[in-house]
Image (cartoon, rainbow, N blue to C red):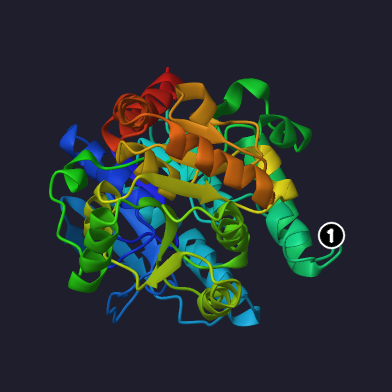
Amino acid sequence: MNILLINHYAGSLEMGMEYRPYYMAREWVKAGHQVTILAGDYSHLRSRNPRVEKDFTEELIDGITYCWIKTGAYEGNGAKRAITMARFVSKIWLKAKWIVRKYRPNAIITSSTYPLDTYAGQRLRRLANRSGGGVILLHEIHDMWPITPMEMGGMSKFHPFIAVMQLAENSFCRHSDRVVSLLPAAKQYLMRHGMAEEKFVSIPNGIVLEEWQKQKSLPEACQQQLDRWKEQGKFVICFFGSHTKSYALEYLIDAVTRLKNEQICALFVGDGMDKENLRQYAEGLGAPVCFMPPVKKSCIPSLLANVDGIYVGIKKNRMSRFGICMNKLFDAMMSAKPIVYAIEAPNNYIEEFQCGISVESENALALAEGIMQLQQKTEEERIEMGQRGRKAVIEHFNYQVLAQQFLTVIQEGKL
């Protein structure tokens, strides 16, 4: 097949996030398909953006054809970012005939964070079907827009930006052949906006097996700290990732402080706007914690191999009702270490696969009890927990499996 994937913010291993379009496309190429990604030349998620002189400049990356569209840079979530969205979608719309003639898609996937690219996708499908038919349009949901900026950002449903996004969401619900959601519990919400029940399929994020086979050593300072703790017989709970309020990190600090157990400590690896506040808070409590700089993605396997348990948590929020699909959760499961999980959502892989301990979110006492319960288990019991998580990831949450699931959805939709 010729697969055309539209994702404004698509990245690659060299450029950085977001990785899902790249990982999916790479597997499709391995399976013998031709894949083209239409992406914007600027994304705040990437560590490096491509240099693009003119629209629809092509670049071949690991067998995937990236077709770059000039959208312009932006900062934050203001009007300038909204303008880049409109620019990206409108350029695809205006160039639709050329795109169809050049790439001859059999399947079109609209996959930007925002839902506006459904209009371009619908036009491309309509034009492509004039010359033969059978072209399928899938809409992939990463984040729930516009409800996320409404509930998390406090924007009114009457705000012009929200109204435009709501019309786009209603449109993809009605007119896409399939709706692929990373969030497993979004079906009922989407049905209220016009989606037929049989269109819905959930395909989560996951891990890339080969990245876990090419792990790199930790920075010296981090390895030395972990070695010291190991010599002292410490039980180390680790958090890795962005230090922001959403991950409820103050509750982890409170929990290990509350335990008053000299053998239990917490390691925070990463950066973020709340890191310094968390550091000061921990110092004020005399908490048994250590903060380390972020490490490269390739070092995560080595990091997690050196700890005893992993904390994965978020603050309570209404968006969790659609389900959880966190990259860090799959990394934690792949590490074969038991997880202390403090998230309230309809799906709970920790309970489903029995690979850790679940506790109430935003409850330091419950989190402390969970950590203590994990620490008091035998080494063999913790190993068995961790191995169940790793087995689940290999069987259900790796991109070889996920990409094939996506291909099956496309092929069934074309019948």
**Residue 180 appears anywhere in the view:** no
Question: Viewed as shown, does residue 410 lie left or right of 316?
Answer: left
In the rendered image, is residue 359 in sight? yes
Q: Amino acid at mark 1?
A: Lys
Q: Residue at x 61, y 73 (%)?
A: 82
Q: Quadrant of the C terminus?
A: top left
Q: Position of residue 394 (x, y in %)?
A: 29, 29
- Determine the secondary structure under disc 1: loop
Would residue 200 be found to the left or right of residue 138 on screen? Answer: right
Estimate the x, y position of residue 193 in percent, counting from the top left.
75, 38
Q: Which residue is mark 1?
A: 157
Name the one closer to the observer, 177 or 353.
353
Q: Nearer the viewer, residue 122 or 354?
A: 354
Front position in the image: 333 or 311:
311
Quarter assignment of residue 49: bottom left
> Measuring 45% from the left and 81% from the top, which residue is drawn there?
72
Picture layout, residue 375 above or below residue 227 = above
